[in-house]
Each structure stands twice: as structure tokens, then as C-alpha cells.
Amino acid sequence: MRVHRVVCPGSFDPVTNGHLDIIRRAARLHDEVIVVVGANRAKHGMFSVDERVAMLEEVTADLANVSVGTFRGLLVEYCRDRGVSAIVKGLRAVSDFEYEMEMAQMNYRLAEIETLFIAANPLYSFLRSSLVREIAAYGGNVSSLVPPPVETRLRAKLAELAQG
Ligand code: ADP
């Protein structure tokens, strides 16, 4: 029987409860989910790719069919090499739609890889990693926005950055 394997791609800088909601829902629908951290532009982020992967591994440890990886270059090449049949993305609002539609159509054109959209949980539709970083940087409470291990690492990272 063919394994139905999908990817959840993103920058995950850091992983939020919104990402985790999509990953969990994808894991219920498919045999295998690989959460892939894009390493192309990761240098400009807050966390290194290794740190992002470590956080994702920690917060998805209870999901037996979820693994974490990284990709460089084109996502569709990664999918082709690993027998991935579809890309799963979360759609938060109309503002996500235009960009995601363009990517989905291009990825199908490049490699006939399908993109499946999951409508964001309204609880998290305002949530993005850059906002979490900003709120945390100004001392705001992010405990309802990210899993506890991520909150701990955010604090440690901000302290590290403050020391220069
Ligand atoms: P961010 O915008 O948080 O930096 P990423 O580039 O890491 O996000 O996003 C990876 C994927 O996760 C995208 O498909 C994005 O739409 C989805 N996603 C991000 N945040 C949420 C959320 N709060 N709810 C649902 N999906 C989300």
C-alpha cells in the first residue's frame, strides 16, 4: 500500500500554537507528516535552523507519525526525492490567500505536487512568528501563543541577545 506522506513547510522562527494546530490536524489526516524548516533565508531569523528543528521535535514528540526535517532550494525537489505527495499549509486570512495560491499553482506546475489548505483555527488566525518575537522582545506574555518549551527558549534567546 502506498504511504500517504505530506510536508508542512515554514520558517517556524519559532513554532507557534497556530503551526502546531495545523501539524496536529495534518497528522490526523495523513499517514506521515514531515515538518520542514526552510533553510534558504534562515540566517536573518532569530533562531538558527538547528534551534527551530529542536523546538519542533520537542513539541511534536507526542505525535508518532510526525518527523522534522530541513530543506534548502526548491521545496518541490525535496518532495520529489522523498515521495511526498502533497504540501499542507494553514490559511489564516484572505491576506494569506493570494501568495499561497500563487505558490500552490507554481509548485503544481513545477512538479505536479498538490497543495492542501487547512483553515486556521480562529483562535490562532492572528498569530504569526514575527508577532510572537516582537511581543516577547518587549516583555509581553506569550504563554497562550506558543508551547511552554518555546516560551522558555524565547526567554533564553532574548537574554542571550541582550548580553550581546
Ligand atoms: P509565520 O507566518 O508564522 O512566520 P511560517 O512561514 O513559519 O509562518 O508558516 C508556515 C505555515 O504555517 C504557513 O502555511 C502558514 O500559513 C502556516 N501558519 C502560520 N501561522 C499559522 C496560524 N496561526 N494558523 C494557521 N496556520 C499558520
Image (spheres, rainbow, N blue to C red):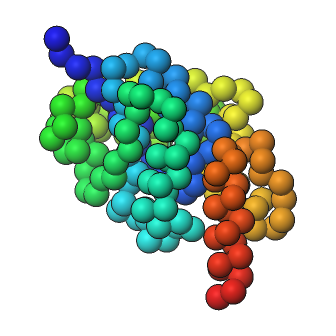
31 left or right, relative to 135 = left
Quadrant of the drawing holding the C terminus: bottom right
User: Residue at left 49%, top 62%?
Assistant: 51
User: Residue at left 28%, top 37%?
Assistant: 107
Q: Residue furthest bottom?
A: 164
Number of numbered discs present? 0
Coordinates of residue 94 in the picture (x, y in percent): 61, 32
Q: Nearer the viewer, residue 109 or 39?
A: 39
Q: Nearer the viewer, residue 100 or 126?
A: 126
Q: Does 83 appear above or below 57?
A: above
Query: Looking at the image, can residue 109 be seen?
Result: no
User: Residue at left 55%, top 42%?
Assistant: 59
Q: Nearer the viewer, residue 67 or 19?
A: 67
Coordinates of residue 64 in the picture (x, y in percent): 42, 28
Q: Does 38 appear above or below 24?
A: below
Coordinates of residue 84 in the picture (x, y in percent): 24, 31
Quadrant of the drawing holding the N terminus: top left
Q: Does 116 appear above or below 128?
A: above
69 left or right, relative to 146 = left
Q: Does 121 appear above or below 19?
A: above
Q: Quadrant of ligand 1?
A: top right
131 left or right, relative to 116 = right
